[in-house]
Amino acid sequence: IDTMAADAARRRQDQLTKPRGSLGRLEEMAIKLAGMQGASAPSPDPVHILQFMSDHGVAAEGISVFPQEVTIQMLHNIARGGAAVSVMAEAIGARMEIIDLGILTDPGPVENVRSERLGFGTGNIAREPAMSEEQLVAAMNAGRSGVERALSNGARLLICGEMGIGNTTPATAVACALLDRPAIDMVGPGTGLNAEGLERKRRAVESALALHLAPGRSTLDLLARLGGFDIVATTGAYITAAQRGLPILVDGFIMSAAALAAVRLQPEVRNWMLFSHSSAEPGHRLMMEALEADPYLNLGMRLGEATGGEALVPLLRLACALHQKMATFAEAGIAEV
Amino acid sequence: IDTMAADAARRRQDQLTKPRGSLGRLEEMAIKLAGMQGASAPSPDPVHILQFMSDHGVAAEGISVFPQEVTIQMLHNIARGGAAVSVMAEAIGARMEIIDLGILTDPGPVENVRSERLGFGTGNIAREPAMSEEQLVAAMNAGRSGVERALSNGARLLICGEMGIGNTTPATAVACALLDRPAIDMVGPGTGLNAEGLERKRRAVESALALHLAPGRSTLDLLARLGGFDIVATTGAYITAAQRGLPILVDGFIMSAAALAAVRLQPEVRNWMLFSHSSAEPGHRLMMEALEADPYLNLGMRLGEATGGEALVPLLRLACALHQKMATFAEAGIAEV
């Protein structure tokens, strides 16, 4: 982080023709981006979205209202532009790369989809590890190479998103493991579980924690046992983005589990993160507290797919436009107070 | 309000390829605009901003950190594009009309500024009425005719904004009068008063309330005694917008006082209002409660000038894009749950 650039941005904000601090967190957004980008004219553009598709063996425990074949259907929907993430990416003018990390059925070649398949979904974490060590490394590398492609496209802001039926369950299990919380503290309705489904989900997370938690297990080991290809790839992407100085906009519940893992692995990654929104998924608050994060938006969103991150982009742009284009008191001939 | 259009929009939201309700308040934005516009394809565009400039005699009580000449300096700054409202209007592609309702000194002809001067500022409400009945009517009409011009330019969303040193004080006085609250409940730091300034502001509002409140006084009478040209013009604008079916996006603290007055005068105006943001000015919360409003953004903004409204516009656009462009479950060949 370029603290000189952040300080200069802060000083500039105090010289702009408005009462000090009166633009609230729009000032903070510009100052933070300035520090991350080492720039006097910070900007989120170009925005690059890595959209990770994967399936999760734990779906067999009946922990989602949607059947698992919806993942492949949504892969096609996202690729064709009909999903929320796609509509918003077009609306905000962001580049999006859709990456199949290993959904249940190989979709074959699909336009706009990059195949980096690591398997046919993960193992059912309630009964077995999600993935092997080799899959873990490959998933991390899929995230890392996604960031390298983003950078070679000139990206100045990274948003990772995910879609895969059941993926709030591994995200919940990872968060419980990393935050040392019981399932009951973190389990939520995801796409819309009723009380019975919620109970199944709680039991699945409890089984997974009972099976996989043991003293001395590393963060990487826990990720391999409890995670998903999406969470692991994002963890790798976040670490690489921070290493390469690319600002990260963390989306909702599932991406926050990856954020927790990345920060646990390399604490300085936290400095490169902005947090888009408070998810309606109840456990999200605990993750934000652990990350000392205060997300900008609170609109009751709980869709995932990078949509919360996308929603914040226009506000980041406004924050940067204000930072660059407002007149200073001196320029406007107004006496500072 | 076209409840058929709102119901149709709600049904469409439930058919889009996402878990029901998972876009949270982005769904609500599209449904509300659909109902207000009687449209299956709601849109905030074109957005029209009426930016009301005025001065306030109560500034003589030392209730602002900025001297009163900053109003005319800011008028030029806004007109030249250097103010926050101007930068954001350009960034979001909104049309803005700047209207001088009577600042302290007549600026003469200024490019991009419409002169509808009703005086040389208002009277000092701590010692006299803000304006005469004639000025009240003229200010209401200035707001009304601004809306007519917006409509003739095809506007589909109205944002009123204001700038004028000291204007949180009349806004506070109006809110206290309409909500039957003592000054202490509503007075806040505005542009950044210290404890001493806050005390002067509280005393000014108390003096104004002691002087002007009396049993049986009408809302219009209270507006003339305690208001400002900006608040009164906006009250007129909101009433006309509602009568003409033009959705209103209510900005922060001062515009919320006008919203309260408009709804007090004509309760059905409330149905045409969206509320952009929670102001950092503490009394704003009480106004929102009285209006049963739950603003969308909470970014610590406290600048006024329509900037909160402008910040929400990109999210309204995203909400409408999602509403129109997302695939339905049927279109995507996905089984609904």
Image (spheres, coloured by chain):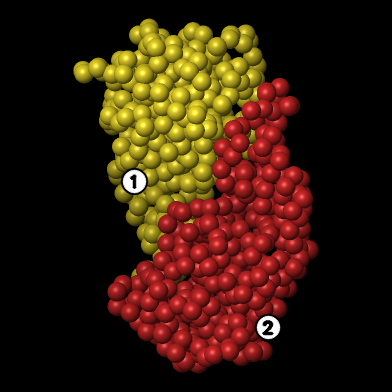
Chain colours: A red, B yellow
Secondary element at tag 1: helix
**Which chain does the numbered disc 2 sit on?**
A
Of residues A139 and B27, which is closer to you in this image? A139
Does the rendering let one see residue A121?
no
* Marking on residue A138: 2
Most extreme residue toward the front is B196
Q: Amino acid at mark 1?
A: Ala
Question: x and y percent of residue B44 in the render?
Answer: 48, 39
Q: Is residue B319 above or below residue A97?
A: above
* Image spot of residue A153 (x, y percent): 76, 61
What residue do we see at 60% from left, 51% from top?
A313
Q: Residue at x 56, y 85 (%)?
A: A222
Query: In the rendered image of this protein, does residue A179 appear above or below residue B121?
Result: below
Q: Quadrant of the C terminus of chain A?
A: top right
**2 and 1 marks in contact (CB < 8 Å):** no
Residue B331 tag number: none
Instruction: Please tell me which residue lies in front, B42 or A237.
Output: A237
From the image, state whether disc 2 or disc 1 is nearer to you. 2
Q: Nearer the viewer, residue A308 or B305?
A: B305
Instruction: Tell whether A114 sits left or right of B186.
Output: right
CA distance for labels 2 and 1:
48 Å
> Judging from the image, what secondary structure is the residue with disc 2 in?
helix
Q: Which mark is residue B6?
A: 1
Q: From the top left corner, tell me how far across and down residue B127 is, in percent.
A: 39, 12
Other-residue count near label 2 (Cα within 10 Å), few / some / many at <14 / 14–19 / ≥20: many
Q: Amino acid at mark 2?
A: Ala
Q: Name, please, the residue furthest toward the left.
A: B216
Left-right relation of A152 to A273? right
To which quarter of the image does residue A201 belong?
A: bottom left
Q: Quadrant of the N terminus of chain A?
A: bottom right
Residue at figure coordinates x 64%, y 19% from the top left? B73
